[in-house]
Image (spheres, rainbow, N blue to C red):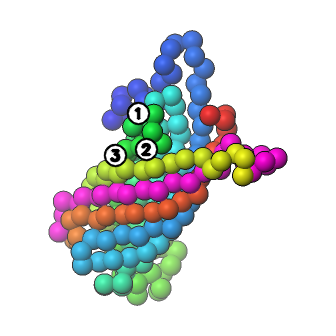
Amino acid sequence: MTLLLLTLLAPAQADTPYPYQVTLLGGVAGLTGPPSMGAGVDGRAWLAGERGAVEVGIREFYTSEDERMVGAIFAGARVAIGELPLYWRAGFAHNHETPMDLVLANPVASTMGTLEGIRHRSGAEVGLAWSSLISPGLLDGSELGDRLGVNADLGLAGFPDAKGPHLYVYGGAQLTVGLGQSR
């Protein structure tokens, strides 16, 4: 995995400077993992190189079927699909699934993932994302002209244990902002 990430971030030529850019993402998301359905928030960041990016993310959902909070953590790689603004991503997934009565009684410990009674689940996630800058013409005179964007994401996470649904489907819509070197 480390070799894959280093290859994705390596410049195309040895004399090319590292053209890193950090992109922050935030928005709304939903999940389904039958019989559970939920809604929540999504926050991610990726460090982009010439051919791909390292991506980390955290989502937090309220599920109505059995009234619990699902904290979904993702760490992996994002790779562009040709010249399109489409990306596939793959990596490690880890969920903290906590009954609402425990969250309400111990909000700090449940958020930190240290509370007794949290179902810790690990697996893998794959996804497809569309990400594009907002037209700089819409933001004339703004510092954000070539940095503000939108992202739509669809992900599938699999968990081999029997502590809950084996598959979750995630969907989200987010705003993005690029930091560092402009691309």
Position in image of residue 51 (x %, y %) = 46, 30
Report if residue 152 lies within the magenta region: yes
Which amino acid type corresponds to the residue marked 2 in the rendered image? Leu
Which amino acid type corresponds to the residue marked 3 in the rendered image? Ala
- Residue 82, label in figure: 1
Q: Residue at x 24, y 74 (%)?
A: 34
Which quadrant: the N terminus?
top left
Position in image of residue 15 (x %, y %) = 57, 12
Tell me the CA gap for discs 2 and 1.
Answer: 8 Å
- Residue 86, label in figure: 2
Tell me the CA gap for discs 1 and 3.
Answer: 17 Å
CB under 8 Å between callouts 2 and 1?
yes
Query: Which segment is the magenta one?
Result: 139-162
- Residue 90, label in figure: 3
Q: Nearer the viewer, mark 3 or mark 2?
A: 2
Which quadrant: the C terminus?
top right
Q: Is residue 131 left or right of residue 121?
A: right
